[in-house]
Image (cartoon, helix red, strand yellow):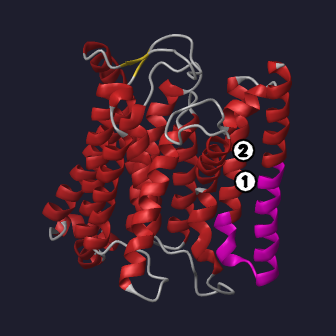
Amino acid sequence: MLNLIYAYLFLFSLALSLIFVPLTRHLAFYLNMIDRPQGRKAHDHPRPLLGGLAIYAAFSAVLLAQIIGFVICKDSPWFSTRFPFLTEQSKHFLEVLPKLLAIWGGATLMVMLGFIDDRRGAGFSYKIKFVLQIAAACLLPLAGVRTDFMPSTALNALITIIWIVGITNAFNLLDNMDGLSAGIAVIAAAIFFLITAAQAQVFSAMIFALLIGAVLGFLIYNFNPAKIFMGDTGSLFLGYMLAALSITSSYVVPTSANLLPVISPLLILSLPIFDTLSVMIIRRREGRPLFIGDRRHFSHRLIELGMSQHGAVIFIYLVALSLGVAAALLPYLPLWGQILLLLQTVAIYLMITILMHVAKRRHQSNRR
């Protein structure tokens, strides 16, 4: 029954996303919210923005419809007979509902911020963006959504805010090539879904199933050659949702050898983090502004090695999938297995660093 519910939520949000994306594409043309190729842009033709609005609309419509339907039907004999498990969990659901609404509310603020940024373009101050992102992140600790592995509530709240803002911006920066940010979001959400479903974290698994469907419907239109971009409206929403939902899930199982599985979200989302940190280091080293876009991202440097845009994105997908599967296995491995897995992760990033160094040398050689 649970598998049917997961499938229903996934297919419902996927269908709505497939419907909403063409609508938001027309809306983007009407509002003249178009991303035109210039400078660091990888595309060669103007592309409409606002694909992120379709992701948000599909996700929110299904989420709110299910919440309202559940609250109305949870006490009816018909619902209790057909969905006894959900009826039994109604008390727990009502307890976590304020946290879920806080996450959705913060994500809605991110969508509004992204829409304004897409509308105004490069003139929008990154300082204002950071302030609003921090404000949205602060909603979560206030609603009780925070990490719990630090010795004090204040430290847990601080780490939560840093995590939310960091991952939100990491997905924003990762959105630099057709299908890249959306594809990584689908892979990450799918890994989180497998972890939460396997550990009977039913409500978390449902939300991830919803998110996968909403993003996948957009990705069909966004994969190279893209017909529409998600814009900051989408990348900020996805980063915020994945960061927040990763905090609400648990990763240590009764058979875990230790508490090391709590770093699973860090591994699953490590590729956007790595891309962001590497770009910031390069910009700092070259004396350029940290918040001005360029073509020094991981994806761009793979193209410098001779890969096509399509090939570079697929390569990054495979890296993200490998790291995500490893993270999903972490709770079930003995200590020696966990150490090997972490060493494998380090080895993967060392290979990526070598590739980036080769790309840098080739780029410098071509400029001479």
| Number of other residues with Cα within 10 Å of mark 2, as a class: few under 14, some 14 to 19, many 20 or more | few
Residue at screen point 38% across, 41% down: 126
- Please state the horizontal and vertical placement of residue 197, each as a whole percent of the image: 51, 66
Residue drawn at point x = 51 percent, y = 53 percent: 189
State which quarter of the image contains the N terminus.
bottom left
Predominant secondary structure in magenta? helix
Badge 1 is on which residue? 322
Q: Is residue 331 above or below residue 214?
A: below
Looking at the image, the residue that sits furthest to the front is: 287
Q: Is residue 97 visible?
A: yes
Image quadrant occupied by the C terminus: top right
The vertical placement of 275 against 324, above or below, is above
All told, the count of numbered labels is 2
Residue neighbourhood size for the residue with mark 1, other residues' Cα within 10 Å, grouped as few (<14), some (14–19), many (≥20): some
Name the residue beneath numbered marker 2: 318
Q: Is residue 328 magenta?
A: yes
Residue 6 shows in the view: no
Do the CB atoms of the residues marked 1 and 2 lie less than 8 Å apart? Answer: yes
Answer above or below: position of 113 versus 198: above
Question: Is residue 196 in the magenta section?
Answer: no
Viewer-nearest residue: 264 or 280: 280
Residue range in magenta is 327-351
The residue at 62%/45% (across/down) is 284
User: Please, what is the three-letter code of the amino acid marked with disc 1?
Assistant: Ser
